[in-house]
Amino acid sequence: MTQAPGPHFSPDDIDLWLDGTLAAERARHLDACRQCLEMALAEREIVEQISALPLMNPSAGFTERVMQSVSVPDPFAIRSISTARRRLFANPRSVATAASLLLVLVGSMAGSIVWSLNNQDTLAAFGTWILAQGGQAAWLAIRGVASNVIEQPWYEGAKVLVGNPTRLALASGLASFAYLGGVLALRRLLALPTPGVAHASL
Amino acid sequence: MAKGVEWVRLTDQEVVLQARAGQDAAYRELIRRYERPVFALLFRMVRDRELAEDLAQETFIKALNAIESYRPEFKFSSWIFKIANNAAIDHLRRRELDTLSLDGSPHAETPEAMQATALQIGGRQESPLDAVEARELGGMIEEAIGRLRPEYRSCILLRHVEGRAYEEIAEILNLPLGTVKTYIHRARNELRQALAHLKE
């Protein structure tokens, strides 16, 4: 061998040579340096042996075993959230609209709170007036209904019935039987026909 | 995405997006893509089939349940290998397995320190069954890899079995690039010495 060009191979040189990316000029060192050539060939042999190691598989059913412990998110929930998000941030205009709405909402809420705190007397007076007006209206409505009932032709008969406990009990019993009969009839009418079940005896 | 999608055509990042959208099939596709390399790495790290399978399962469950925290600007392979490697290293540390090195501690700076931290080959207790299995899996080279320090083992397996770039290995193992190169060089050196008797 002649005088080898350049210094001996460094580990980086060997890596590049193994990858086939070492500059040709630098690689020529191997032509003249037995020591580096032997080292490079030995490294290549090791790398080839490692690269030739067999591929390995986990046992059958590995995927299923993993999937049993993985929580896959609900696609519908994600889709609705992501769709809303996508629509909201679709373009600067939609973002500006959403921001304006939010501003109006928050602003009006804040304004309402500030006004209420500064006008508590007005609010209290308004509440009292509302209560008084509501009570008066309710009393008028009750009186109207009562006078209406008294004027009905069946009112006197009902009054006699309520006045006699035996008659009242009899009327209540009859009404309860009629109600029960009605409920049972309705249930029968609403029940779906039962279809035949194939191989039901198996 | 509709059913019948050609998963093979999608990149890992695209499959992850589908998984995040709640596609069960996307999760299965990620497992299909990485079950073999992850299992192989773990098996060669812990040298126990059942344990490697448990760790692989743990790796996938951890990764897939945390798929929201995966950052798509990084390779999915780096992420899953990082989780797998951490699982293996944690296990090896817990069990305090006898690890052997001809060169001593990877952090040793001087020849004396390396000598002081070096362990002798033969100290590792390997069952006859393990030995038979190792021979079946590739003979002496497999055994020699099993005797390397875990850090060297991860580096050499990721580089020469999985074909990962130095930069990716550095990212996976959270090590400086120079350290990864040093570990791989030392690992190859140890393997060459461990297998030298075969040539004699």
Image (cartoon, rainbow, N blue to C red):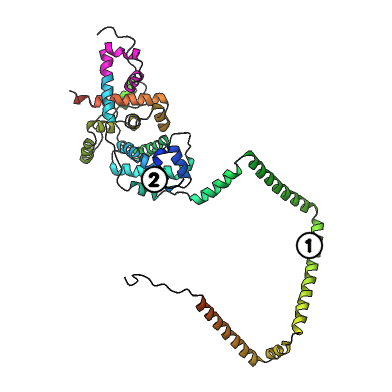
Is residue B160 positioned above or below A162 on the image?
above
Is residue B128 placed above or below A142 in the rendered structure? above
User: Does A173 appear above or below B96?
Assistant: below
Viewer-proximal residue, A81 or A37? Answer: A81
Q: CA distance from mark 2 to mark 1?
A: 64 Å
Q: Which residues are magenta?
A: A12-39
Other-residue count near label 2 (Cα within 10 Å), few / some / many at <14 / 14–19 / ≥20: some
Residue A189 image offset from top left, x and y in percent: 51, 77
**Of helix, strand and loop, which mostly describes the magenta segment?**
helix
In what element is the residue under mark 2? Answer: helix
A197 displayed left or right of B67: left
Above or below: residue A189 compared with residue B138: below
Q: Amino acid at mark 1?
A: Gly
Label 1 marks a residue whose chain is A
Front: mark 2 or 1: 2
- Say the numbered circle drawn on residue A40: none
Magenta residue check for A97 = no
Label drawn at residue A127: 1
Q: Residue B154 at x, y = what percent?
A: 35, 32
Decide if residue B25 is on the left or right side of residue A187: left
Crowding at label 1, few (<14), some or many (≥20) Cα neighbours within 10 Å?
A: few
> Which three-letter amino acid code belongs to the residue tagged 2?
Arg
Residue B99 locus on image (x, y percent): 30, 33
Task: Pick whichever, B139 or A190, lies toward us.
Answer: A190
The image quadrant that residue A149 belongs to is bottom right
Is residue A19 magenta-colored? Answer: yes
- Identify the residue shown where x is 28% and y is 15%: A36
Mark 2 = which residue?
B28
Position of the C terminus of chain B, as image quadrant, is top left
Residue B107 appears in the figure: no
